[in-house]
Amino acid sequence: MLKFFKKKKEDKPSLMADTSKSTDTSFYPLTISEVRRETEEAVSIAFDVPTEHQEKFTFLPGQYLTLKTTIANEEVRRSYSICAAPSDGELRVAVKEIEGGKFSTHANRHLEAGMTIESMPPMGNFKWQPTEEPSHVVGWAAGSGITPIMSIAKTVLESDSSSTFTLFYGNKNSNSIIFKDAFEDLKNTYVDRLEVHHILSREDQGSDVTKGRIDGEKVKAFNEKFFEVGATTAHFLCGPLGMIESVTETLESLGTPKEKIHFELFNTTAAGAAKKEVSSSVSGASAVTVILDGEETHFEATGKEFILDAALDAGADVPYACKGAVCCTCRAKVLEGSAEMVMNYALVDDEVKDGYILTCQAHATSDKVVVSFDE
Ligand code: FES
């Protein structure tokens, strides 16, 4: 039940998807329609989607695209959250240039309208399912973590005339705030229903509470001043590991049920990302079968190898992007045998219970393992 052809703003069709999860991990060529400079360090990139693929590229606010291109003869893949709301009728991501970042530097310095880039259809568990009930949603973002939150905020405010959104957004200074003007415009449209609080680490705004980084102490202070934990429908967090952990812990300690807290991490390369020890009773290598698009690939993997890497070595064109437990592009289901993950910041508890794994983080723990990317 896709609502793709419902007409919205400026007669652009809404790109709102239904609740179904995309299992299509193929790449499709998209033409860049615009590269817009958002800050000195960040651009947003809009894509034209060929008519025949438009239905595949519908999305829920909060989801991301996995982009693939070749830079200096090397294939590079990265996931970027969609910053447009489905009702905007466009597909747009924002990319902040990171020091030494191959894709982000390329995107900020070399991409331009008319170029083609490959993308998987939108995916990801970090998403807001629009509701016709009034909601009070709180967004917590740092830096480029604002991209999915922007899409969610717009959709929350549009979907019900009494829904409200409160944003806490951390940056170095006012020049590094992505979508500053866009949020000002939104505030003018939703005067009584949108609150935006900027927290700056290197600029004084005249108040201690808005100086520094978003952490547990700030959450407590904001809870007393700007929102009431008991009256919130959901919290969406996007930023570095430290922020995610401290905000989540504090929200929970204030009485927020776990299922109301949704998060997406930038990456897990930062020190402190906890890795689980995986022990296997398998002596030697496991016999692994991966199924992708109905085709089977058979190979052996030792308990030290990740299933994804072993599958790629065996020639299977299995999907991946971050290889860091964050994006869930490499999600697959264990149909036979067992496998355990060392890290998981992308799958929700129900998926893990149903047998899904992040193959980039999973070791085979039985003699025979069958894993499907088609489920
Ligand atoms: S490739 Fe991103 S979680 Fe595995």
Image: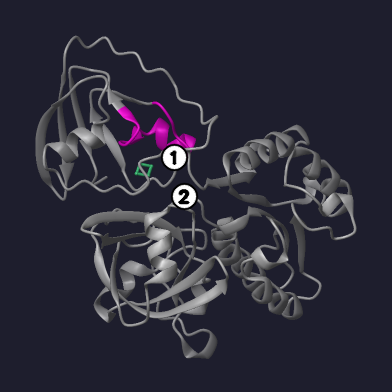
183 or 138, which lies in front?
183
Residue 207 x, y percent position in the rendering: 89, 55
User: What's the residue type where badge 2 is placed?
Assistant: Asn
Q: Quadrant of residue 333?
A: top left
Q: CA distance from mark 2 to mark 1?
A: 7 Å
Residue 126 x, y percent position in the rendering: 51, 51
Q: Which image quadrant: the C terminus?
A: top left
Q: Is residue 293 visible?
A: yes
Indicate yes or no: mark 1 CB to ligand 1 under 8 Å.
no
Mark number for residue 128? none
Above or below for 225 versus 243: below
Q: Is residue 130 visible?
A: no
Does the magenta segment cover residue 103? no
Query: Which corner quadrant of the figure contains ligand 1?
Result: top left
Above or below for 304 versus 239: above
Mark 2: which secondary structure? loop
Q: Which residues are magenta?
A: 342-362
Residue 84 x, y percent position in the rendering: 51, 71
Q: Quadrant of residue 19?
A: bottom left
- Is residue 67 shown left or right of residue 189? left
Q: Do the residues under discs 2 and 1 have CB atoms within 8 angstroms?
A: yes
Mark number for residue 347? 1
355 or 244, which lies in front?
244
Pointer 2 or 1: first along the chain: 2
Which residue shows up at 63% across the image and 65% down it?
153
- Is residue 79 shown left or right of residue 306? right
Which residue shows up at 47% across the image and 65% down it?
82
Residue of label 2: 125
- Is residue 6 shown left or right of residue 211? left
Does the magenta segment cover residue 353? yes
Residue 52 x, y percent position in the rendering: 24, 77
Mark 1: which secondary structure? loop
